[in-house]
Image (cartoon, coloured by chain):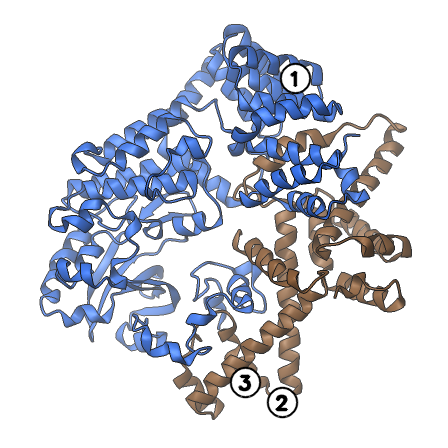
Amino acid sequence: MLAAGGNDSVRARDALAKLCQTYWYPLYAYVRQRGYAPHDAQDLTQEFFARLLEKNTLGAITREKGRFRSFLLTTLNHFLVDEWNKARAQKRGGGQVVSLDARDAETRFGREPVDALTPERLFEQNWALALLDLVYRQLQHEYETDGKAAIFNELKSCLTGARSSVPYAVLAPRLKMSENTVKTSVHRLRRRYRELLRAEVAHTVTSPGEVEEELHSLFRALATS
Amino acid sequence: MDTAETEICQHCGKPFGAKAVQGLCPECFMKVGIGTGAVADPADDPTLRAKTPRFIPPTREQLAPRFPQLEILGLIGQGGMGAVYKARQQQLDRLVALKILPAEVSQDPAFAERFTREARALARLNHPNIVTVYDFGQTDGFYYFLMEFIDGTTLRHLLADRKLTPREALAIVPQICEALQYAHDQGIVHRDIKPENILTDKAGRVKIADFGLAKLVETEPQSQRLTQPREVMGTPHYMAPEQVEKPQLVDHRADIYSLGVVFYEMLTGELPLGRFAAPSRKVQVDVRLDEVVLRALEKEPERRYQQASQVRTEVETIAMTSGNTPAVHERKKNMNTRSHKTLWFGIGIGLACPVLVFAIYFLAARGGSDPSQLAREGWQLWQSGRPADAIPKFEQAVKFDPKNAETWNGLGWASFNTGKSEEAEKAFQKVLSLNTNHPAALNGLGQIYLAQKKYGEAEKFLLNAGPRAPAAWYGLAKLYLIQAKFEQAEKWAQMIVDSGQGDEGARAMLQAAKDKKLSDGLRLMLEPQ
């Protein structure tokens, strides 16, 4: 299932590279959220990917179970702590490390989502947005390739709700279709969208059973804004 | 969709501008992707079509010729009481909300007369916490209200995400009370108080919508409605018992009951159904709130509060006197947040409790040796992420008032967060000597021992704090993971995630517990250094 966590091969690394490409922004935004300046955040994100794509780390990831998203974040956190410790050690000649963790234990749980979207929440949200953007573009591309760009443009508003913002009766003459054909087209568009969405999510989880769960948690992340 | 429409989603009514995915509302886009609600979608299942004769809101194209003075920008909400559109009143260049009542009301011959009479009364309501009616009328069979446009969200949307903190609820309730008291004084009963009708604008002001509409839109005799419940009735959960049993006897006290339901839901995230528990048994809130909520929810109108203003007074008194004992889950870490929501809740509190604000300024001006004032300042500093500055405040406060467990608790946390474990331990011990069951102090000691790798001690204290201090769950999940006691770790991590408040870390812990395997990355994050 999880192509990025499949065999330790060139193919797997390519798949991982592709995923990194798709989900670059959520990671970058997360690093920024952690208080790094734009320039440092760019460097850190770059460096993180470089390490991730190195064989060792890749091996470590493939052994992990669960969602790619969670583990990317855990690994990134690990990486940031690491970098932070290094920077500190340089500055203070390797002084004692204060446990920030203890403070976190009390406050992180008490944090209110409405108060400030936690960096983790924001990460999930950006992840969901990156996923939706990718799937939208895939869907659009498919319709364009099939010479159905006009249909896609007229019907895309049906991708967000039970009804189109324009009644089918109005769409039908515009698309030179019968009302029933419009309905069928909407049905097909939605079905294809759902297929593509699931296919894309499947790249980031280890078993097919986790796809729905991942979709729901991404939906929750979007709904908390 | 043009850009004006993308600001607010036509389907869910929420603004989404900055997050738009290719011009689409991401939440609804994802929802369609998951397939939620797809069964009710006529396009997906044509057999469902004829069965649900519901109110279909008119399209923009249908409305435009009937309202030439308005530029209809988009549908922002719909329900049993009609559909609401965002529109611009061109002459005045102001945004307005246009409410179109369901077409079926006009089939009732007596409606026109009743509409004019009631609408006049509603338009006379002029109160900062009530959505203002600018105009009303009938055009081509459409009955409409033109109202103040509220740039904000509904309480339903806020509650959909999570339950509110007691503090937020305490800022909202007095404003609802003010609106209700004002309307009741004018002889108008809302009859349909529920989170969908309670709006909050960006300044944190509460605005109640749809005053009296329930009565207006009611087109059938009550007896018939009871045997044939219709969508217009809305959800019955917020209705006072007498609204169902003796509708002809309904008076303003029905609104007080509904307010009680909303209040309960804000505090606990649940509806008070059947034999429900008092709020403080479900969440960490001031026990005095139990009495307020339960009295508003009395079945007999005679036993309820008789005036909304009484509820307001009680709530404000509680808000004022529990200022220095924040519940664990309402502590705020980031005061300088990007989210404007904090600001408007903050302003909300300010508006709701001018007396409290005044009192703070007054005491601050005096330079205060008042221990409760010092403690409050300490908590404020602590909450804004400055525990080191909070320490002297708490230290001074305990000198004046050494028997106050809360103040010692504050000193404990401020010390702990600045890395002074010994001082923190002493302070927490002091709290426990005053109150052996103080959950925050038990949790505090647990966290200290956890950081010192004294796992046995940590477990004892965290388990004691457990049921009442959700923050301790995090410590327990972590403790058991470190010790590779995966089953116990799973139990606590699951509780965090189930509570809806877990973050990525909590879910990573849960996953690791289920997998019975702690990755190196996670271990590094969890183990004290």
Quadrant in the picture for the N terminus of chain A? bottom right
Q: Compare residues B165 and A44 and report the one nearer the observer.
A: B165
Q: Could you give the CA–CA distance between mark 3 and mark 1, rounded to whole angstroms?
A: 66 Å
Residue B32 higher or lower than B509, as above or below: below
Q: Do labels 3 and 2 share a chain?
A: yes
| Chain in blue (letter) | B
Mark 1 belongs to chain: B
Q: Compare residues A189 and B487 and report the one nearer the observer.
A: B487
Q: Compare residues B238 and B457 and report the one nearer the observer.
A: B457
Residue B5 vs residue A90: left or right? Answer: left
Query: Would you call the spot at circle 2 few (<14 residues within 10 Å), some (14-19), or many (20 or more)?
Result: few
Residue B196 vs residue B137: left or right? Answer: right
Give the residue type at disc 1: Ala
Query: Would you call the spot at circle 1 few (<14 residues within 10 Å), some (14-19), or many (20 or more)?
Result: many
Kindly identify the residue that appears in the image at 44 percent across and 79 percent down: B43
| Residue position for label 1 | B424
Residue B201 vs residue B385: left or right? Answer: left
Give the residue type at disc 2: Gly
| Residue position for label 3 | A151
Mark 2 secondary-structure assignment: loop
Residue B55 higher or lower than A25, as above or below: below
Residue B115's quadrant in the figure? bottom left
Mark 3 belongs to chain: A
Residue B141's quadrant in the figure? bottom left
| Chain in brown (letter) | A
